Amino acid sequence: MLDISELKTVETDVVVVGAGGAGLRAAIESSAQGMKTVVLSKSLLGKAHTVMAEGGLAASLGNTDKRDNWKVHFRDTMRGGKFLNLWRMAELHAKQAPARVRELEEWGAVFDRTKEGLISQRNFGGHRYPRLAHVGDRTGLELIRTLQDHGVHQGIDFLMECTALSLLKDGERVAGVLAYYRETGRFVLLKARAVVLATGGGGKAWRVTSNSWEYTGDGVYLAYEAGAELMDLEFTQFHPTGMVWPLSVRGILVTEGVRGDGGILLNKEGKRFMFDYVPPRFAAETADTVDEATRWLNGDKNARRPPELLTRDVVARSIRAEVKAGRGSPHGGAFLDIASRRPADFIKRRLPGMYHQFMELAEVDITTEPMEVGPTLHYFMGGIRVDADTQMTRVPGLFACGECGAGMHGANRLGGNSLSDLIVFGRLAGKCAAEYARSLSSTPQADAERVKLAVRGATEILNRESGENPYLLHEKLQDVMEEGVGIVREEEDLKKGVLGIEELKERAKNMKAHGTSQYNPGWHEALSMRSMLVTAEAVARAALIRQESRGAHTRADYEGERDEWVKYNIVSRKGADGNMEVEKVLRPAPVKYLEEIANSKIEDLEAGKIGADAPND
């Protein structure tokens, strides 16, 4: 019989699960508020997926174009998200992002500079003005470096290569986390007053993905099992440009910065095809002027903002359409050409990571020849449902931020909004978690039986004589998601996908990992399968319910956006019988000034005719 008093135990105020940009920023804020803070890192510190966000942080600094301000950024974000964003989250993000970027600069972040010495900003898809503060094409890496340095010197405790298994509760309140060290297999019980989830998405449920091995939907699973709600998980973003060749690197991200710095998309016939896919309504809403929209639609190559910088859902579907029409590149993608557009020294200076990535992994010199690229599962717009102002879930003491949280991006995320999302809502989650922890008179006590069940549930995978191979189940899940829940969906395929996931859930109950708990990747894989199955099921079921095409969710059997559906979010929760319940939930109405800003003409917004009464909190 397990005696939980024998488990290694850590007592703290706040536990942050995840050491990417959101988790680090949450931990820094919690610690700054005087709370003892512990960070769990599934991998080594510095290995967070944030480093893959290369293009920049979106913030209306106005360094490159003085006309930019938070209202224009908010308007771009709402329109990019097809008006399904939580209005308040998009407002907070647009208002606070500039201060968070300047804060990074104060903490030592080394940004590229304009001739005047200001932080340089580049164009990105869906953004009206050059808005992305950047460090070449390694912005995420610089963000992580800066936050890690700052956090370590604040005295935050880091438990590396330590994976969360279960959230612990005292009644309805969060009481801590049960985790295990991946190297030794030893369990650790973290008793805490508040927990912040910052675990990223679940892209490893798909085969072609830019996500690394850590992205198995852990936060979604932990929150779901603890009683929190999930939201908007049908919106899974396929980044238009991932590497497609060789197969060993298929899916690895090719930053949007390539297109932001002048790269164009060509089919195998050498045609610049994106002009053929500009939605008329989108052109009118997004282009600078009516004349600019007409240039896009008429294929004028002198248009100021190229159609390659349309939102990611549009570009990804366009590449897929060219491939299906037989006009794709030799390995099933399209050509991304910057070599004919920019000199070699410019490319090496602005895109050093991309230059070395293609040279070393594909033996392609992007200064002299085009890249082969194609859509890759990249980002979850949906995730754990939170309150916009506190980032707390419906479980008291449980917070979520970053990619594993829902609401900020709506139906489609604009490039660069992810990194600024991390630092804006990471700070907010850390601040509110600290305030919540301080408000409690004592630390909640974890239910001992829940701890025992969680340990037993993990170790039974090792104790079975035989069972299902977790690696084979993972491959089967990727087949199900690629075939039924891919970039374009329809009812029959989605229903098959749900049935396939249900079958895999049953088989997963009998997973077997051979060997001991020490140095056992098979055991790690089996435990991750639990997270991926819950995440995949939530995506598939939500996609089946939403009978329209909006943003990153495309239904071949329900083309186009439908006005009735902008009124609803799809929310998933664990039912009393243990099965997933999925339903349409009516969205709250926006405050008047936000609705006016989002629906305004850009000329009126720039002239100050709209949003003058908006508070600048």
Image (cartoon, grey):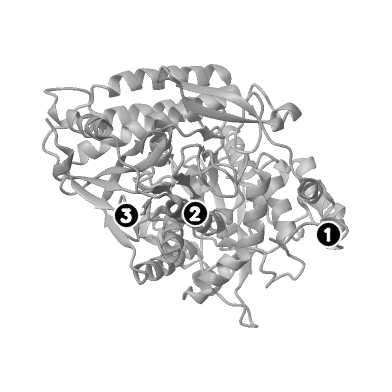
Q: Residue at x 53, y 23 (%)?
A: 582
State the mark number for residue 12: 3
Closer to the observer: label 3 or label 1? Answer: 3
Judge by depth and name the residue closer to the eye, 69 or 193: 193
Q: Quadrant of residue 532?
A: top left
Judge by depth and name the residue closer to the eye, 138 or 19: 19
Q: Residues within 10 Å of mark 2 (few under 14, many from 20)?
A: many
Q: Quadrant of the N terminus?
A: top left
Is 197 rendered above or below residue 317?
A: below
Identify the mark nearer the N-term, 3 or 1. Answer: 3
Closer to the observer: label 1 or label 2? Answer: 1
Q: Amino acid at mark 2?
A: Val
Does residue 417 appear to the left or right of 306 in the view shown?
Answer: left
**Image location of residue 146, percent across then percent down:** 43, 69
**Image location of residue 295, percent across then percent down:** 81, 52
State the mark number for residue 612: 1
The residue wearing badge 2 is 254
Q: Residue at x 79, y 51 (%)?
A: 597
Is 358 rendered above or below residue 550?
A: below
